[in-house]
Amino acid sequence: IVRPGTGNDARLENDVTINGNLTITSGVTMDTRSGANTYNITIKGNWENQGDFEERTSTVIFNGSGVQSIFKGGPSYGETFYSLTINKPSGDVTLTGDDITVTNLLALTNGDIVLGSTNLIIGNTGTTSGASISSYVQADGSGVMKKNYNAAPVTFAYPVGDVDDYSPFSISGLNSAT
C-alpha cells in the first residue's frame, strides 16, 4: 500500500483503507501522490500526525464506529486536508492539537466534528457540503470555525452548532481577506 520514497518519506500507491489508527511519526513525510496519481485515505481509527502530510488533491474519509480523533503536533504547525469527509455509522470526530485546515471541501454526511480547543479553518476556495442535524461542526469549546476569503465577495454557510443543537448561519457579501 505504501512504498518508500526518499529518506523518511512514504508514498501511497493506491487508495487505502486503514482499519485502525494512522500515526505519522516525527521526521516522516506521508505523500498521497505517486507519480501523476493522487490517492485517497479512508480511516476507521484515529489520525495522529507528528510529522508531515502532503495532502495534494486527496480526500481523507473518516468512517469508523465510535469516537475518532484528528491530532496534529510536531515541528510543523497545523494539519491540512484537501478534502475531508465525515461519514460515520456512529460517533463523532474530535479535533485536538494544532489548527486543522480544509482547502477544498469539507463533506459532512453523518457524525459531527467536535472542535474542543482546536480551530477548524476552511481555505480561500474551500466549501462545505451535506451538513444537517446528523452531521455538523460542534463548537462547544474555545476552538472556532473560520473561513478564509479572497478579495472577491462571497457567501459562506457555517454548518455549526453545539452538542445538542444544529444552528447553521451564512455570511454574505464579504469582500476583504480575513
Image: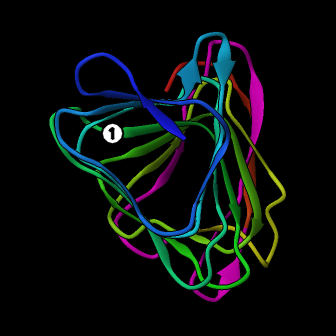
Residue 104, image x, y percentages: 67, 31
Residue 28 position (above or below residue 118): above
Q: Is residue 67 left or right of residue 29?
A: right
Q: Is residue 153 left or right of residue 102?
A: right
Picture residue at 34% right of the left edge, 66% below the top: 142
Q: Is residue 23 left or right of residue 37?
A: left
Residue 144 position (above or below residue 6): below
Give the labeled residue for mark 1.
78
Residue 15, image x, y percentages: 67, 41
Picture residue at 70% right of the left edge, 59% below the top: 159
Magenta region includes residue 153: yes
Nearer to us in this view, 138 or 100: 100
Q: Residue furthest bottom?
A: 164
Picture residue at 42% right of the left edge, 65% below the top: 21
Task: Using the rendered view, name the quadrant where residue 18 is placed.
Answer: bottom right
Nearer to us in this view, 140 or 97: 97
> The residue under label 1 is which amino acid type?
Gly
**Numbered-mark total:** 1
Residue 92, image x, y percentages: 57, 77
Q: Which residues are magenta?
A: 138-167
